[in-house]
Amino acid sequence: MPRQASFYGRIRRRQGDTPDPMKVFWRFLLQRNLSKHWLEGVHYAVFGLGDSGYQKYNFAAKKLDKRLADLGAVPIVEKGLGDDQHPSGYEAALDPWMSSLWSILNKINPKFFPQGPYLAISDMKLIDQPKVQITYHGDDNVDSQFPTNPDLKWIEMQIGWARSMSPGKFTHDKTRPGCFLKMIKNQPLTRAGCGKDVRHFEFEFVSSAIEYVVGDILEVLPGQNSAAVDAFIQRCSLDPDALITVHPREKDNHFLRTCTSAKVPIKLKTFVELTMDVASASPRRYFFEVMSYFATAPHEKERLQYFASPEGRDDLYQYNQKERRTVLEVLEDFPSVEISFEWLVQLVPPLKTRAFSISSSPSAHPNQVHLTVDVVSWTTPFKRKRSGLCSMWLAKLDPEQSIYVPAWFQKGTLHPPPPSLPLILIGPGTGCAPFRGFVEERAIQSESNATAPVIFFFGCRNEENDFLYRDFWLSHAQDGGVLSEAKGGGFFVAFSRDQPQKVYVQHKMRENSQTIWKLLSKGAAVYVAGSSTKMPSDVLSAFEDIVSMEGGLPKESAVRWLRALEKAGSYHVEAWS
């Protein structure tokens, strides 16, 4: 590696994992033969994109910064830590960090910025070219490729062609679906009118079945509202039936590798539907900056330039993020902006798959996969009704209709335990989803072999409103079931709103500290799943109190004991926001 190289890293990860593009680089940096002087003379800057709702907030950025310094590299500026939880998003930390970086670089070598580090460029001629270019194809020799009644294979190829051409950073295995599913059950788990809508979905494979294990993740590509897609296409003066291919403008563009084989023309509307989130996701600040170059109305141009500036960051947050304005709504608010489709392909947020913990055991439900989904909906400060794209799409699917659901199976962080391993499960709300699969699996295993005890702590607001899978848990907690006292197990529920004093899972854990300590002493593994806000840290704090009290250890020793449990792979957390 050349000694004068410089690094500029942006890292974003929820659970503290190393981002996929960084993994090879990170393994290289961890080589034991690298001395503490190996990166002498190298200067670097690291900015991490994280979410402080997670325990390992910006962990990857922190460990990269430390490793580079340990190898002798020198930071140009102190590491920056962006936080999605901040009212203004990660830009709240990025703006001052970038200003410091440019200022220091300018002092190191003024030639980096011949016109100064803070030059504002408003000349349309100086805007970058979009990173993609669109080729429009005539109907000749193409119409025959589009069947009148598309089958499953054709739909799979369409998704693969579209997503492999998209500049969105989809990994290679996320272009074509791993399988297709058909919904066979759409069952509400919560009482109507209680303010929450949690559904139990059952799917069966309509393509080749994919093997999975309990604790795995199912990723779903949601369908978009057809009317919203049509409105976007009309607003942007696009031809929905135009046949297009999308190419990188520059040979070193990051998605050249994934699209070199994707030269099959696809209808523009299909491309939008499968790759561009036009009516759910909010655009980033750069979208407003580019729009300002294309605005012809002076008042719109001025407002867009203000939104794109550091001074307008807070007002942009109030207008955009807090209201969760969509790309379509933003474009409709600035009617003088006529932006090219190339720029739209680059700047519209990509249509992402949504990940759900699988709530079934394949042993209990062959050829099926089940999900437990909170149907997300809310009202913005200005009384706009919003809903989660994927959860609402799934909730509206009718099992009587043959709608193919594109899906991918992924390994989760909750690894399937062997039958001989005692389990302590904590899963309030929809965090119970993976543990439904765990209990189903353990019940089947217990039919032919002795199994270790399982205790499960569940939490919800009210016993009558949102006690998810009530009959299922109670059936396994009695008559010798895997959660029954007769099997050394237990099932404990915290109803947070059924009494004046709120009761959460951590309170029930402390009430049953002896039971927990008994299983921990026998080598039990801990599994925690649910909301990332406060629950994981509150549960960990409860474990620290229990280990300290029941084990007769000082608090500091209890903390170290639990860290050792985590390092040994016996304390698992799967949290989401």
Image (tube, rainbow, N blue to C red):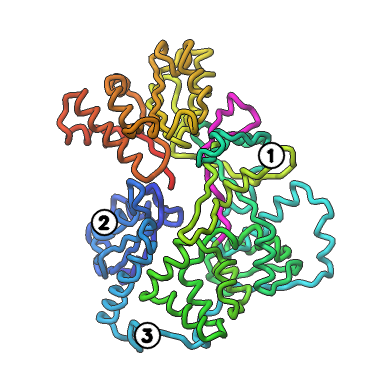
Query: Does dot 2 land on a helix, a strand or a loop?
Result: helix
**Which residues, given as a range, are shown in magenta?**
350-370
461, 557: nearer the viewer: 461
Residue 286 in the image: state x and y as whole percent. Answer: 47, 72
Q: Quadrant of residue 165?
A: bottom right
User: Quick one: label 1, few (<14), some, or many (20+) residues within 10 Å?
Assistant: many
Residue 78 in the image: state x and y as whole percent. Answer: 25, 65
Which amino acid type corresponds to the residue marked 2 in the rendered image? Lys
Please indicate whether residue 170 sits to the left or right of residue 368 in the image: left
User: Quick one: label 3, few (<14), some, or many (20+) residues within 10 Å?
Assistant: few
Q: Is residue 380 above or below residue 105?
A: above
Q: Is residue 561 visible?
A: yes
**What's the distance in space between the residues labelled 1 and 2, CA to CA?**
48 Å
356, 389: nearer the viewer: 389
Q: Quadrant of residue 502?
A: top left
Rendered-image quadrant of the N terminus: bottom left
Query: Does dot 1 land on a helix, a strand or a loop?
Result: strand
Q: Earlier in the sequence, mark 1 or mark 2?
A: 2
Checking the image for residue 119, the label placed there is 3
Q: Earlier in the sequence, mark 2 or mark 3?
A: 2
Q: Main secondary structure of the magenta part?
A: loop
- The residue where tag 2 is placed is 66
**What's the distance in space between the residues labelled 3 and 1, CA to CA?**
55 Å
**Residue shown at 61% from the left, 50% from the top:** 221
**Residue shown at 82% from the left, 69% from the top:** 139
